[in-house]
Image: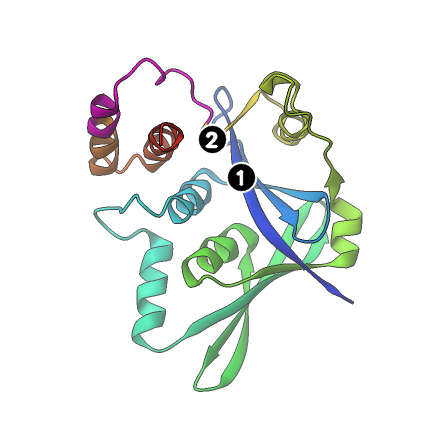
Amino acid sequence: MSLVRLNIKGISYSQTQNGAYALILSEVDGERKLPIVIGAFEAQSIAIALEKEIKPPRPLTHDLFKNFADRFDIVVKQVIIHKLVDGVFYSSIICERDKIEEIIDARTSDAIALALRFQAPIFTYKNILDQAGIYLKVNPKKDDENDPESLLVDELVSDDIEMVGKETSYKDLSLEELNRMLDQAVNNEDYELAARIRDEISKRG
């Protein structure tokens, strides 16, 4: 079976349904998206890895794993989403130490959080993408509420979904206020909020 490389397109969340998050992966050489429902902790960990400018005051679990692996010369070479059963994705982490390769089973959310920290590629098999991949035709001129991607995630978690980083309540705040809020969010270890504030700061250049 042939492998298809995936990139992370974004994380979506529900404001009214606790714990409702979805990770959207997209195939590198195609138009299909692979949506995966994940937990709140894993969503936060992935968001922190994507937001490289946000440094937690203490290492998260996946950061601890990375530090542990670095200390013992273990490298994550790649992650493969290898199975889909009853809507649940199963993944393997391909590791290497002393030129010996090992395969470790993992939850897909954990595997991707680690792949980001090791800058390792993410793959799935073509048959899984054929089964669960979805084409999204996005018209950038439409409002976010009509975004097919948001509608897709809405079906996954059965609630209203808003893409992380599309928070609009910060638009009237100054950069100084945003930076102060960012520092406070990081100190409080509220990394989901910190990621949204960082997105707003980045949009202003």
In depth, the one of 46 and 138 nearer the eye is: 138
| Residue at which label 2 appears | 164
Q: How many marks?
A: 2
Q: Tell me what residue is drawn at x 48 percent, y 59 percent.
A: 115
Q: Position of residue 86 (x, y in %)?
A: 72, 46
Specify start and end residues of the magenta stretch as a single range. 166-180
Q: Tell me what residue is drawn at x 31 percent, y 45 percent.
A: 53
Question: Badge 1 local density, few (<14 within 10 Å), some, or many (20+)?
Answer: some
Q: Quadrant of residue 171?
A: top left
Task: Say what secondary structure mark 2 lies in.
Answer: loop
In depth, the one of 134 and 157 nearer the eye is: 134
Is the C terminus in the top left, top right, bottom left or bottom right quadrant?
top left
Question: Is 177 left, or right, of 74 in this rendering?
Answer: left
Q: Position of residue 128 (x, y in %)?
A: 75, 54
Is the N terminus in the top left, top right, bottom left or bottom right quadrant?
bottom right
Question: Badge 2 local density, few (<14 within 10 Å), some, or many (20+)?
Answer: some
Which of the two discs, 1 and 2, labels the residue nearer the N terminus?
1
| Residue at which label 1 appears | 10
Asked if the stretch drawn in magenta spans residue 108, the answer is no
Q: Tell me what residue is drawn at x 44 percent, y 46 percent.
A: 46
Is disc 1 in contact with disc 2, using a CB cutoff of under 8 Å?
yes
Dominant secondary structure, magenta? loop
Asked if the stretch drawn in magenta spans residue 177, the answer is yes
Q: Amino acid at mark 2?
A: Val
Q: Amino acid at mark 1?
A: Gly
Q: Give the answer, above or below, for where 84 lies relative to 3.
A: above
